[in-house]
Every structure is written in structure tokens, then in C-alpha cells.
Amino acid sequence: METIHVLKLWFETVQNIAAHNWGFLLLIPVIYALRKIKVRRPRTWDVEETPWDIAETPPDTETLSLEQKKGQRGEDFIAQILYDTVPGEFQVFRNVYIPHGGTTSEIDLVMVHETGIFVFESKNYNGVISGSMDAKNWVHIHPNRKKYLFYNPVRQNRNHIRALSDCLQIPETNFYSYVVFSGRCALERVPENTRSVVITQTPDLAEQLEDTLSELPTLYSAEEVQVIAGRLAPLTDVDAAVKAKHIQDIRNQWESDICPFCGAALVLRRGKYGDFWGCSRYPRCRFTRQV
């Protein structure tokens, strides 16, 4: 009975409104129709954003050019923050090519500071980022809601530090890893920061550095910083042949049907994100590559 009473009241109200303002009733279906129409506005990531990371699957030349430009913007921002924020004696190097295991490792930025050596991995992404400390891949949810996998940047920077430590003959305990995402993305379910591994975003980088540097002891004198910097300088001014070989090594690694981790054959598998190539020695070897 209560329902019938409510319906009667609603019907009487509509009749009263209709008697005074037919235009209001006509406006209701118009508003409803407008809410159903989805106008696609231009989005910056349609042109600028690509899910590819240079440690993952190599794209065509045009995509590589866009990705390089986007990566350089992220590196420019980080370098400027370092010059504006960091106190004491230090030097910054970009695009450092470290020979390691018969190939080369390219490091985005290296800062030689009186408190240690800071290695920065720049990820100029937007969207949502999630992943764990030891997972091989992290998940990048693009603003268009598509999901992509990219190599765990913590592991990636750990490999960079290992290569740089071997090259400079400096213990890994003197290194600090910084994985820096852009302020345009959201970090969800990423590892907590430690003293030696920091995952942050460019808007928070200055504060993170200030907190870290204020607690670290001095390891190197101004003269020692200059000596280490002198050993790094030749590794940034490499010729085009070295850069081309580095890119080709990555292409060979990620286009081969042989597992780059253990040398076994790769087999085609199906996962929740689609088809992928996996090592035939799984679970002993957990290498995967997107199709």
C-alpha cells in the first residue's frame, strides 16, 4: 500500500509540474540523452605515451623516437632537480654505457656524491603502476585501461649497479638505487622504500634526496669524487657504434627463440594477459617475453 501511495504522490507531482512547465518535462529526456553520449576528447597519451621500455620489446623506429624523447624529458627533469637540490660535492652523468658480460648496460643517470654513488632509473609514464620488489615484471595500466608488463625497474637498476660496481671496482654497499616515475602516474602496491632502494616520483624526489643525504656519512673527499667522475666520463661520451650495438644486443636478446637467462628454448604459453613466450625450463627459469 505504501508503494501505491508513493506512486500516486509522484504522479500528482508530475501532473502539477506539467501543468505549469511543459518545458521541464521535455528537458528530462534531453538530459538523459546527453549523459549517454560519450564525447572522446583528445588525450595527450594518444600521441606521447607508449608502454614500451627499452629493456623490453623493441618497437619500430618511429615509436623508438617518441619513446626516446619522452625518456629524455624525464631525465632532464631529474637532472634539474639534482642540480637545484643536492648539497656538497657531486657530479651528474647521463646515458652511461657500462660494459658488462660481453654486452653493455645503459644507465639513465648517475650521480657521484661525497656520500656515495646514486643510480637513477627514469620511468616517464602515466597511468597506474604496481609491482613487488622481486617480481620479474611490473604492471602498467595505461590511461586507456589497457595493461602492459614492463621489466621490474628495481631489478633493472640492481643490474645496473652490479655492472657499475664491477666496472669501477667499488662495493655495491656504496651505491643507492632510485627509481623515479613521473608525477602523472599513480603508484599502487609498490614496495616500501629502504635506505638503499627508493621508489618515488619527480614531485617528491627533492624531499626524498634531502632526507637521505642528511642521514648518510661522507664517504669521499672532493678529490675522490673527481677521480670517480673522471673514470665515468669516458663512458658517457661513446660513439654511435657503441649505442647501435647496445640497441642491437637488446633486439637480439628479445627476438631470439632462446632464453637469454639460461639458454633453453622458449615455448609459447597463454596467461591472463594473453600469449607470451616462456622458458621451457620453468619453474627453474622464470624468463618471459610478450608476444
Image (cartoon, grey):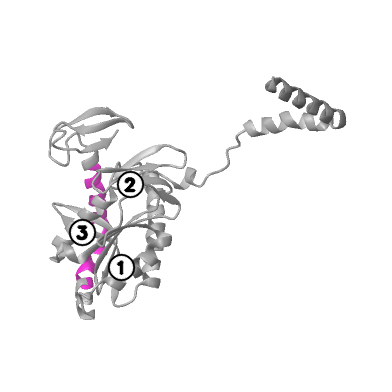
N-term mark: 3 or 2: 2
Query: On screen, 49 above or below 121?
Result: above
N-term mark: 1 or 2: 2
Q: Residue at x 41, y 55 (%)?
A: 182
Give the SS element for disc 3: helix
Image coords of residue 281 (percent x, y): 13, 33
Can the viewer see residue 1 in this picture?
A: yes
Query: On screen, 24 above or below 197?
Result: above
Q: Which residue is mark 1?
A: 212
Image coords of residue 133 (percent x, y): 26, 49
Give the SS element for disc 2: loop
**Residue range of the region highlighted in magenta in the rendering:** 229-252
The 10 Å Cα crowd at callout 1, few under 14, some 14 to 19, many 20 or more, is: some
| Residue at far right of view | 20
Q: Quadrant of the C terminus?
A: top left
Q: Which residue is mark 2?
A: 53
Query: On screen, 51 above or below 257?
Result: below
Q: Residue at x 35, y 70 (%)?
A: 210
Say whether residue 250 is magenta.
yes
Tag 2: amino acid: Asp
Tag 1: amino acid: Thr
